[in-house]
């Protein structure tokens, strides 16, 4: 059965099942000691994996596979490449805003992706700001209020 998606359905689904994240990966070979990896993830029980493949097809990017962070039958569609975020994910959610607090995550995610596109994370001035913004997008981050005060208005 082929799953057809529309923008409104995707927005609602991502509001419930999606996550915009940044990982800070220690790496001694990188100038500032950390690599920032952007990731957009949507998870689903494997019985509904066709939805994840439909999202991959709709956005024309990402990978579908078992979610190693969650045990059991959870699968994920993951988009990791910065250019894929800039070309596919960000334009979609700019045109079709999320309806929940997930929109705040998206605004932070977008802001950090745009800074990384400008290579700001590779400069002495930009890295600390990018690192701080990435901290608010970590999988375990609960620092929503900090973001709302400091980063709510994207450039």
Image: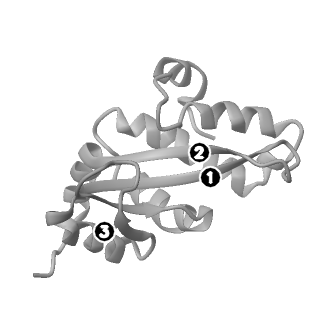
Q: Which residue is mark 2?
A: 23
Q: Earlier in the sequence, mark 3 or mark 2?
A: 2
What residue is at 84 percent from the left and 48 percent from the top?
A: 28
Q: Is residue 130 above or below residue 118?
A: above
Rendering coords of residue 51 (x, y %):
21, 67
Is residue 130 visible in the rendered image? The answer is yes
Contact (Cβ within 8 Å) of mark 2 with mark 1: yes
Q: How many marks?
A: 3
Residue for point 17% across, 75% down: 4
Mark 3–mark 2 distance (CA, rounded to whole Å)? 22 Å
Compared across the picture, whether 128 is left or right of 90 comes to right
Quick one: quadrant of the N terminus? bottom left
- Which residue occupies 21% across, 56% down? 8
Q: Position of residue 56 (x, y in %)?
A: 35, 72
Residue under label 3, please give it: 55
**Numbered badge on residue 37:** 1
Mark closest to the chain's N terminus, 1 or 3: 1
Q: Distance from label 2 to label 1 (Cα)?
A: 5 Å
The image quadrant where one finds the C terminus is top right
* Secondary element type, mark 3: helix
Q: Residue at x 56, y 44 (%)?
A: 22
* Relative image position of residue 112 (x, y in whole percent): 63, 45
Discs 3, 2 touching: Cβ within 8 Å:
no
Label 2 crowd (10 A; few <14 / some 14-19 / many >=20):
some
Please tell me which of labels 2 and 1 falls first in the chain. 2
């Amino acid at each position: 059965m082929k799953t057809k998606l529309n923008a409104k359905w995707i927005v609602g689904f991502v509001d419930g099942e999606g996550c915009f994240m940044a990982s800070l990966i220690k790496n001694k070979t990188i100038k500032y000691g950390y690599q920032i990896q952007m990731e957009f993830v949507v998870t689903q029980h494997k019985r509904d994996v066709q939805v994840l493949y439909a999202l991959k097809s709709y956005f024309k990017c990402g990978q579908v596979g078992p979610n190693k962070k969650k045990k059991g039958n959870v699968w994920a569609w993951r988009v990791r490449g910065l250019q894929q975020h800039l070309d596919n994910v960000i334009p979609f959610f700019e045109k079709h805003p999320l309806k929940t607090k997930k929109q705040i995550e998206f605004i932070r995610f977008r802001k950090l992706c745009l800074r990384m596109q400008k290579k700001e994370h590779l400069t002495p001035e930009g890295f600390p700001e990018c690192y701080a913004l990435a901290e608010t997008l970590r999988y375990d981050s609960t620092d929503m209020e900090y973001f709302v005060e400091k980063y709510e208005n994207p450039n």
